[in-house]
Amino acid sequence: MIRINNNIGIIIETNYNYAYVYLNDEIIEVTLSKNIKGIMNRTVFTGDHVLIKNKKVIEILGRKNILSRNKIDNTKNNPKLNDTIIATNIDLALIVASPNMPKLHPRFIDRYILILNKSNINYKIVINKADLLDEESKQIIEEFQNRGVEVIITSTYSNEGIEKLKKIIKDKQVILVGQSGVGKSSLASTLTENKNIISSHVGDKTERGRHTTTKSSLYKLDDSSFIIDSPGIRAVSIKHLNISDIKDYFKEFDEFTCKYKDCSHINEPINDCGIKKALKTGKISKYRYESYIKLISEIK
């Protein structure tokens, strides 16, 4: 449950010298108090729960987690200046993708899952633009479902899956992540029924286009449910992860035995590698194995 009272608000959006906070059903502009040193948008982030007094942030409450595109030490409450922080205090991440326009790329989803796993953030996949579903995208969706990942099919035109998403988001602070053009902002607008879109009330001062999300912003579904719409990106870097993070993600590989304990499943002969044997017999899908090789190669 989101904790909000007369003095505790949620950061909606940040700028260099000020931020917008949702507090007591109002949006107010705040600055940092003198006891908090730093630049505003490098000190507080969308999703932060903050203590407010006289329109100043006097305390940043402890963070449940931090979602970043770069390496971050989650044991610390103060991210480094060179980290790209997307949002904080996330109960659930919805990885939004589309069958086409842009095309569904399972490896892009794999990268986001790796980052979310590293940040200890639960996730589900949302396939938006249901009317564009084809056989190829259905097969990709089935791959994820077979591994126990929940996939919700949605459409902002027919409202397919919208009520289901509302139930999932209830009493949570949820973030929408994914590529540009998959319809994250349209989903946020549809979910809030165009009446609780906090970011639309921020005003011209942010200089942010209504249809293009350039920074993370907070939307209100109800008094205890919030949606963070994050900027769409073209690529997700995983270079801050290590090989064990990758291997942990491919848990289905564990049931196959290799000759050597440190087998990379890449350069070893097929007779020595249980994974390659499983690939040849169809027990491991070609997509999963190719994704594994690509991710390991990027780490190395």
Image: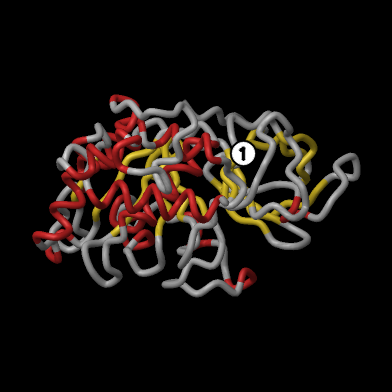
Q: Viewer-proximal residue, 280 or 246? A: 280
Rendered location of residue 155, percent (x, y):
19, 58
- Indicate the quadrant where residue 248 lies: top left
Q: Is residue 76 left or right of residue 84?
A: right
Rendered location of residue 130, percent (x, y):
15, 59
- Indicate the quadrant where residue 195 lies: bottom left
* Residue type (three-letter) at the residue carrying disc 1: Gly
Q: Which residue is mark 1?
A: 9
Badge 1: few (under 14), some or many (20 or more) residues near its Cα, within 10 Å? many
Rendered location of residue 122, percent (x, y):
42, 33
How many marks can you see?
1
Going 78% across and 43% down the picture, which residue do you hit?
54
Can residue 102 be seen? yes
Can residue 27 be seen? no
Q: Is residue 133 above or below residue 174?
A: below
Q: Is residue 35 left or right of residue 43?
A: right
Q: Is residue 105 left or right of residue 52?
A: left
Going 35% across and 69% down the picture, which residue do you hit?
181
Rendered location of residue 15, percent (x, y):
69, 61
Going 29% across and 25% down the picture, which residue do you hit?
255
Q: Viewer-proximal residue, 119 or 165? A: 119
- Tell which residue pokes out farthest to the right in this image: 34
Q: Secondary structure at mark 1?
A: strand
Going 39% across and 56% down the picture, which residue do you hit?
108
- Indicate the quadrant where residue 208 lies: bottom right
